Amino acid sequence: MKPSVAVLYQQRPALNQTNFIPGGGRELGAAIARALFARGVRVITRREYPRAGQALDWVFADTIEGVRAAREAGADTLWLVGPAGEGHPAWSAGVRVVLHPPGLAAAAATESSFGEFLENVLAPAGQK
């Protein structure tokens, strides 16, 4: 069964975080969600028909409420754009969690490496 992925942006910086993405990565998260969607991945969004130019249509906040909303909308996989330390609500959501890897923007520059990355990350356990 193919995963249903919700992308979560970082709403506020983590304690002692020095590399916080301005806007919490909403734009980056929306770009990832659109890229996943374009590759046939079922992407769970905040709107039934997300608008291309509206980042918040494509992503959920990485809060308890955002994780709950993504789960209730059907997500079985959460893609986190920001860090997920101990106590992050995604860890207790009972779903698969994908941490945004360093260098993903560079991988996305070439279609094949981004596609390979997605296949490896989203493959069901034991099928990599």
Image (cartoon, rainbow, N blue to C red):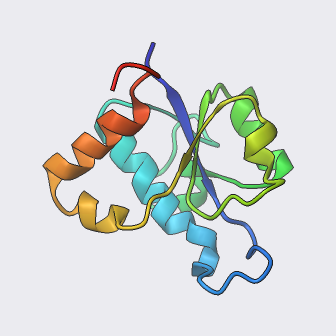
The residue depicted at 73 percent of the width and 44 percent of the height is: 90
Is 67 drawn above or below residue 85 in the view shown?
Answer: above
The residue depicted at 80 percent of the width and 48 percent of the height is: 89
The residue depicted at 42 percent of the width and 32 percent of the height is: 122
Q: Quadrant of the N terminus?
A: top left
Q: Is residue 50 visible?
A: yes
The residue depicted at 75 percent of the width and 28 percent of the height is: 72
Is 79 drawn above or below residue 37 in the view shown?
Answer: below
Indicate left or right for 80 with 10 as reference.
left
Q: Position of residue 121 (x, y in %)?
A: 40, 38
Indicate left or right for 105 with 55 as reference.
left
Q: Position of residue 88 (x, y in %)?
A: 78, 53
In this view, the residue in front, 44 or 83, is 83
Q: Position of residue 69 (x, y in %)?
A: 76, 38
In this view, the residue in front, 18 or 26, is 18
Q: Quadrant of the C terminus?
A: top left
Q: Is residue 52 visible?
A: no
Indicate left or right for 50 with 15 as reference.
left
Indicate left or right for 15 with 56 as reference.
right
Q: Residue furthest top?
A: 1
Q: Position of residue 123 (x, y in %)?
A: 39, 27
In this view, the residue in front, 10 or 57, is 10
Is 121 drawn above or below residue 76 in the view shown?
Answer: below
